[in-house]
Amino acid sequence: MNSEWKTTACPYDCPCACSMLARVNGGNIELRVNPANRQCSFICAKGRRFIKRIDDPRRLLHPLLRRGADWVKISWDEALGLWAEKISAAVKDCGPLSVMSFASAGSMTFSKQLIPAFYAALGGFTKTKGTLCSSIGSAGLKESTCGFGVPYVPLEDISTARGLLFWGRNSRHTQPQMAPCLAALRRGGGETACVEVRLSATAAQSDRFWRISPGGDWALAAWLCRRLVDDKRDCRGWRARVINHEEFLPALHNADMEGLLAQAGLSEETAEEICRWLLSHYPVVHIPAYGAQRYLHGDMQFRWIFALAVLCGGFEEARAGLSFSKDEGALFPEGLFEESSNIRRFGVTTWPAELLKAEPPVRVLNILCANPAQQSPDSRLIEKALAAVDFKVCSEVFMTRTAELCDLVLPASIFLEEEDWIGGYGHSYISRNERVAAPRGDRPLPRRRYRRRDAGPAVTKQAEQRIFSQMGRMISGDARLREVSRNLYLWDEPCYWKLSGSRARLPETTPLPLKIPAGHLRLVTVHSELYINGQNIDAPASCMEPIVNLPEKFCLERKIAAGDRVRVLSANGAELTMRAAIDRSLGGDTAWAMQGLPGLNRLTSAYEAPGRGAPYAECFITIEKT
């Protein structure tokens, strides 16, 4: 018998947050697009794979406790009791800051934002600050918008623009639901163009493609700003909206135009071509990439691209503005719970080093919605930090590399087995996800106590449900929302570029010249269309082979052929054996690999960056043929 179709949405860390309808049909789960979400027209391969995850034989179904080199299946009663004892002892001996929660974006549903409420009941805790994905660029944009936040242009507006300029964004792999928008733009006579370090899938499908040096986007944007001002082709009213135009203009006029082009890796002829394209396709939406901000100067990358959007007329015509992303949790209710004032924050990339020298020490660590041993920079240091923690608990669907390094592993549910809420950072829909299938494996008892009373106020399943229900009532009762179909809501979100009160602060400095150590290549990592953020245990085996893509001239000089095994040695002392591939679209000092490959982040370093983000592209390698 078929069950009724229920509303749900994909929880991946992806701008699309695809709205879906799901049901159980003869014991099998079926998914289809929810037609009420006008910005979702298909379900990608990543989303469809959730069906197989439900009953994947590798899925974790029972709590597992490490005993020596073995894993032993235990009950939820034993698992939660042991966890409570460890927390109780840590709080008693070292205080609440000795308990740490590491949560990332493995699932973007709203319930994950309730986690601080339970740790706050201890009297405080340790957590991380920043994100691996967008913190650096977002920090620059928040400063540029005078605190408004990250600017966003709705897809329906982009589809009617005359041009769209991707600053490295490979939307075909990272935001596939943009495809109908791009098709509509072209039908209206517009063009798409791409400034990229390589010929990505999106660049290959664009009307124009210009190769740029990694991290040189800001320099091209600054050069274009200067040309617009010098030629009096900048929009008329931008100075009235910029609070520091008197400081910005001298910084612009003092810039070395030849030096800017050298930083961008572009000839003057190519830069002039880009400038002519911008002027002839007004309005042009500027869409920077997540990869474009993964440098130590990533905030300035975005600040200068933002400045170009302002001079191109973003305040006069929103379709000439910059669109990065939006706050997917903007409608998460404020004041839902009282957060503790006693919170210690480590950087999202630097936490292993901070943990190793922390006082009080971290005694108990809970990792959820994350696989830092594979996803985060400098995985060698992460392994060292985890080894220094007395008791580590990981909530996971599969036995990931991080789970393998923990002491207790708790099986996590999949979104099709949950009731929850979710927003998106690529559209303005909010979904109330319904439970489609019964959770697999063992489940904790309904009123299980998560912590002992002497560790702080006890948090029961009943209390958890109460705060979750309160969250649901507050969201569904939000006057800004209108229900467009059952459990799918839409809100008329404020657009920064259209608000009369919006003000901008443009950059007054330029980054220091970028340098690559002699004899090295800069290694950049890119997203796959087959998995996201290293969640690739169930991805096709063909995309898991460790491949490093190298410039053609580089390979010719070293007699490296496609398919050769090479040693990739990082400036941080790590190395990895990979297979070589030749990419003729690369500049001579650049290499790239697919993010999420096992062992790849041994090569990267955990630097402190603006916004506490992750500057993955600050990775320099040499290559030796084996």
Image (cartoon, rainbow, N blue to C red):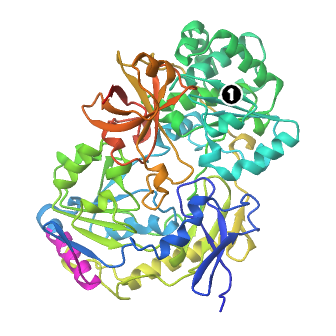
Quadrant location of residue 400?
bottom left
Asked whether residue 1 is drawn in magenta, I would say no
Asked whether residue 76 is drawn in magenta, I would say yes
Note whether residue 315 is visible: no
Q: Which residue appears at 56% of the width and 24% of the height? A: 218
Q: Which residue appears at 57% of the width and 54% of the height? A: 14
Stretch in magenta: 72-89
Please say if 160 is above or below 492.
Answer: above
Tell which of 553 and 4 is nearer to you: 553
Q: Residue type at mark 1?
A: Phe
Tell which of 199 and 66 is nearer to you: 199
Q: Which residue appears at 44% of the width and 50% of the height? A: 544
Q: Quadrant of the C terminus?
A: top left
Give the side of residue 209 with respect to residue 471, left or right. right
Give the side of residue 383 with respect to residue 604, left or right. left
Q: Secondary structure at mark 1?
A: strand
Most common SS among magenta residues: helix
Q: Residue furthest right?
A: 188
Q: Residue furthest bottom?
A: 1
Residue that label 1 marks = 209
Q: Which residue appears at 76% of the width and 29% of the height? A: 313
Question: Residue 66: image x %, image y %?
Answer: 19, 70
Q: Quadrant of the N terminus?
A: bottom right
Question: Residue 563: image x %, image y %?
Answer: 44, 35
Quadrant location of residue 445?
bottom left
Question: Residue 458: image x %, image y %?
Answer: 29, 79
Give the side of residue 602 with respect to residue 47, left or right. left
Mark 1 residue crowding within 10 angstroms, few (<14) / some (14–19) / many (20+): many
Tell which of 144 and 178 is nearer to you: 178
Please say if 129 is above or below 202.
Answer: below
